[in-house]
Image (cartoon, rainbow, N blue to C red):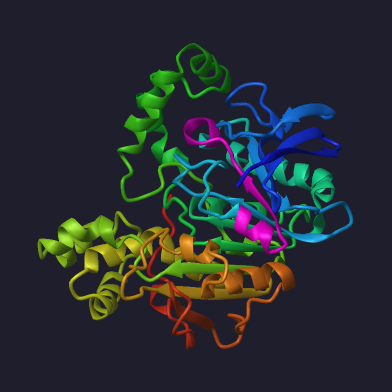
């Protein structure tokens, strides 16, 4: 299909994108100015001529897809997607969120990039409490969207924030009372994976990997002088934390969330492949017992937890522990502690598709699939389509292809109290 240039004028400036006759696409629009790699973001300059005709890499950019003909005052629902990737990889240029498909369905779709690795997540002593640059980046993007999205046909009062994995962490962090500014109306947090331990317990590893004081000025100078060394240092650092997020927002507290309507999801078998070497060797259960305290299992809770894990997956206890410790425990914490309207979904495998981490992305963003129908319904109306979790801890259990949906009661209850706080 041939394309032509198209232009939108908004407070950010004159933004030139492309159109295929059905969808207008604007790639890699800068939404922030970075004085230095480890400094907080500043708003991008306004009134510029912006070439958004082709994707460009860079954390502080966003891409927009909107229906052809969409104009100011059309008040189309806005879906903002924040990618995952352990705060190590991923980009606003990733295409699996199917921006064009959503635009054809009458949405304005925005993909947001943010800083990764040390520049995005390494905290400094002079940072404000609970502030992380990756989160600040996305907050700056939301403000940009509020100021500019009407020119693309979007309704700034009807923004749904969707995040997966590390992106779910950012979504939830933006929904904290001390961060929430009313710039999105509702949120979806798919498979959040918060770190189990604080950066203070890992400072030694970061300091050793970088070989320089953990000071903003020192690291800005290193990034300017030798970015390859900075990247290698992060690689050395993260090898210490294979079964956890090396860097991420900490500590997570669901009670700190604002009263924001929220869907939270997990897959049944999130990180089963990580435990597969132990499970296939027939030592999954003993290996899991050895790892239990390291993975955050509270004292006195291991026996009951492993009995339940063995009943669920007798030949995959190692993978079950990693899945529960890295992801599913947080989903239960959120469901139990979030103050606003909350719906929970547990996604099950199909005959051909395992329910591992990230395997829900393609069906959730494929227009017309069962999972996508729930997502688009929520983004349009604020209702998930099944009963809220507060109705007797009700959870929808559904296959990845959207079939077999059934409401169940408290399927993650076996995790409650198993994983204690870790400093």
The stretch drawn in magenta includes residue 421: no
Q: How many marks?
A: 0
Reply above or below: 136 against 33.
Answer: below
Q: Quadrant of residue 78?
A: bottom right
**Residue that protrudes farthest toward the top in the picture:** 225
Q: Quadrant of residue 266?
A: bottom left
Q: Quadrant of residue 342?
A: bottom right
What segment carries the magenta color? 100-120
- Can residue 90 be seen here? The reply is yes
- Residue 107, given in percent of the width and then of the height, sits at 71, 60
Residue at 60% from the left image edge and 63% from the top image edge: 188
**Residue that protrudes farthest toward the left in the picture:** 281
Q: Which one is in front, 184 or 71?
A: 71
- Residue 172, given in percent of the width and then of the height, sits at 60, 57
Reply above or below: 345 against 57.
Answer: below
Residue at 29% from the left image edge and 67% from the top image edge: 320
Q: Which one is in front, 24 or 299?
A: 24
The stretch drawn in magenta includes residue 116: yes
Q: Which one is in front, 278 or 9?
A: 9
- Can residue 179 be seen here? The reply is no
- Residue 324, given in percent of the width and then of the height, sits at 36, 65
Residue at 10% from the left image edge and 61% from the top image edge: 281
Q: Which one is in front, 8 or 21?
A: 21
């Amino acid at each position: 299909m041939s394309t032509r240039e198209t232009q939108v004028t908004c407070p950010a400036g004159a933004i030139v994108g492309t159109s295929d006759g059905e969808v207008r696409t604007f790639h890699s629009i800068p939404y922030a100015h970075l004085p230095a790699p480890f400094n907080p973001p500043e708003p991008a300059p306004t009134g510029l001529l912006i070439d958004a005709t082709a994707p460009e890499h860079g954390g502080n950019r966003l891409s927009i897809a909107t229906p052809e003909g969409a104009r100011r005052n059309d008040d189309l629902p806005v879906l903002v997607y924040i990618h995952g990737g352990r705060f190590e990889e991923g980009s606003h240029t990733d295409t699996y969120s199917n921006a064009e498909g959503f635009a054809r369905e009458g949405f304005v779709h925005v993909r947001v990039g943010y800083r990764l690795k040390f520049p995005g997540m390494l905290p400094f002593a002079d940072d404000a409490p609970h502030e992380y640059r990756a989160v600040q980046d996305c907050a700056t993007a939301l403000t940009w969207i509020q100021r500019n999205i009407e020119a693309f046909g979007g309704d700034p009062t009807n923004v749904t924030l969707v995040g997966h994995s590390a992106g779910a962490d950012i979504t939830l962090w933006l929904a904290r009372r001390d961060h929430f500014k009313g710039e999105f109306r509702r949120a979806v947090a798919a498979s959040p994976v918060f770190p189990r331990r604080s950066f203070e317990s890992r400072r030694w590893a970061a300091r050793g990997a970088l070989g320089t004081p953990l000071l903003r000025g020192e690291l800005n100078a290193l990034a300017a002088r030798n970015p390859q060394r900075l990247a290698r240092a992060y690689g050395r650092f993260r090898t210490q934390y294979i079964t956890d997020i090396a860097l991420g927002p900490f500590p997570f507290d669901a009670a700190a969330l604002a009263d924001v309507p929220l869907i939270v999801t997990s897959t049944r078998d999130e990180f089963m492949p990580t435990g597969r070497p132990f499970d296939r060797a027939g030592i999954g259960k003993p290996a899991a017992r050895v790892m239990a305290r390291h993975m955050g299992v509270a004292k006195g809770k291991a026996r009951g937890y492993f009995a339940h894990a063995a009943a669920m997956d007798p030949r995959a206890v190692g993978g079950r522990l990693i899945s529960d410790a890295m992801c599913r425990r947080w989903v239960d914490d959120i469901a139990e502690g979030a103050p606003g309207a909350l719906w929970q979904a547990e996604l099950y495998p199909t005959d051909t598709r395992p329910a591992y981490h990230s395997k829900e992305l393609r069906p959730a963003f494929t227009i017309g699939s069962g999972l996508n129908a729930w997502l688009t319904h929520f983004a349009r109306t604020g209702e998930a389509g099944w009963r809220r979790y507060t109705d007797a801890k009700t959870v929808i259990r559904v296959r990845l292809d959207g079939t077999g949906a059934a409401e169940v009661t408290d399927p993650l209850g076996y995790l409650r109290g198993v994983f204690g706080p870790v400093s």
